[in-house]
Amino acid sequence: MAQDLFQAPDYYNLDDLLTEEHILIRDAAREWVKRDISPIIEEACQKAEFPHQIIKGLAEVGAFGPYIPEEYGGAGLDQISYGLIMQELERGDSGVRSTASVQSSLVMYPIWKYGSEAQKHKYLPKLASGEFIGCFGLTEPNHGSNPGGMETKFKDMGDHYLLNGAKMWISNAPFADIGVVWAKNEEGRIHGLIVERDMEGFSTPETHNKWSLRASATGELIFDDVKVPKENLLPKKSGLGAPLGCLDSARYGIAWGAIGAAMDCYDTALRYSKERIQFGKPIAAFQLQQKKLAEMITEITKAQLLTWRLGVLKNENKATTAQISMAKRNNVDMALNIAREARQVLGAMGISGEYSIMRHMMNLESVITYEGTHDIHLLITGMDITGENAFK
């Protein structure tokens, strides 16, 4: 088993911009990843199995709803703390970060922001502790980039709602205890419903044969005349803006997380370049390898500055959807390019499970698509700067 020798790059001394609390939180997550993720993640990926034993540890490092107030079981931390935790988790594996990101931003966030007090007290403490794992049902077989076209619907049956439809590409679905599911009422208005595992007619078949996010559990959500109690409707917000608000929070976490994957690929390539001898000297001494490495650290540093500033704006409640989209798009693209270049530095060894690079590369092929594709985020920025809607 290879030892985790990761050393995080900080070329512009960004730690000086963080508080002592930020650094303590980040370092705790970093050490947990080194101890509990790095030794098992390659095997989990090769076997395409989610390592369920990590759930307790994720809760202990505050990865589940770190910004949720303490009265509901969260840690009451700020948005930069949340970002730093996501960065460290994705340094370990995108699938690990996905599990925490979905739990935090797509399940706990909507219950906290849109839920009743009874819903908050019933679900949030159990989600924060990892006793409950949640999933988020928005994407459908026929509706990905156009979630407003969803076909999942519910009817008012007097003493309950009757839910029918299907969702797909849902992280955590196969073992989730609850799902925050988005569906249209009889008037076509989108609402969020909390669906519980034991509700009759609710099933979650697992998605197999993935080349990406292999250590993450993905599945479908099938609703066949599911009776949902009326008290499970999220009462405080409806319309497409409700699930999109959750995605803003998740995309923000991804912007930080992608940096972690990039940092791991860069660190691996840098260390390898100093050890690999060709033509009588380490390949780090050759100009083309230095070009690759210099460009990697430059792009990582730019992304770090981008997300730090976005975190400040998030803490001030000033971050816009378009700003979050820019960071998600830029940072995932940056990380994917670095993974590809780092693989080249390692040559044939770059495809080996002895190193993390190929795993990161495959994972990032999903991350660049989910929660808004690379092209959709480009159009969000385009609409923001021109005032013209290219979606219709």
Image (cartoon, rainbow, N blue to C red):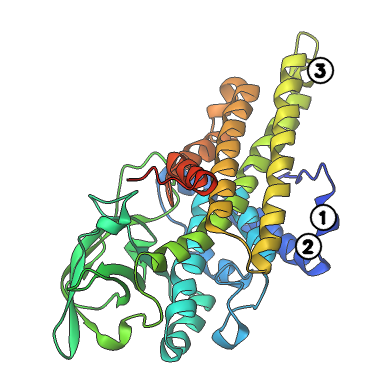
Name which residue type carries label 2: Ile
User: Which residue is at the front of the view, 97 or 230?
Assistant: 230
* Contact, mark 3 vs mark 1 (Cβ under 8 Å): no
Select label 2 or label 3 by which is in front: 2
Q: CA distance from mark 2 to mark 3?
A: 33 Å
Q: CA distance from mark 3 to mark 1?
A: 29 Å
Select label 3 or label 1 by which is in front: 1
- Residue receiving disc 3: 285
Q: Is residue 111 above or below residue 331?
A: below
Select label 1 or label 2 by which is in front: 1
**Is any atom of residue 356 visible in this view?**
no
On screen, residue 299 versus residue 58, left or right, reads right
Q: Is residue 131 above or below residue 376?
A: below
- Residue receiving disc 2: 23
Identity of the residue drawn at 47% across and 67% down: 103
Q: Secondary structure at mark 1?
A: helix
Numbered badge on residue 170: none
The quarter of the picture where residue 266 lies is top right
- Mark nearer the N terminus (1 vs 2): 1
**Which residue is at the far top?**
279
* Contact, mark 1 vs mark 2 (Cβ under 8 Å): yes
Percent of width and height locating residue 201: 17, 72
Percent of width and height locating residue 386: 51, 44
The quarter of the picture where residue 313 lies is bottom right
- Mark nearer the N terminus (2 vs 3): 2
**Mark 3: few/some/many CA within 10 Å (<14, 14-19, 20+):** few
Name which residue type carries label 3: Ala
On screen, residue 210 versus residue 24, left or right, reads left
User: Which residue is at the front of the view, 159 or 55?
Assistant: 159
- Residue receiving disc 1: 15
The quarter of the picture where residue 15 lies is bottom right
* Contact, mark 2 vs mark 3 (Cβ under 8 Å): no
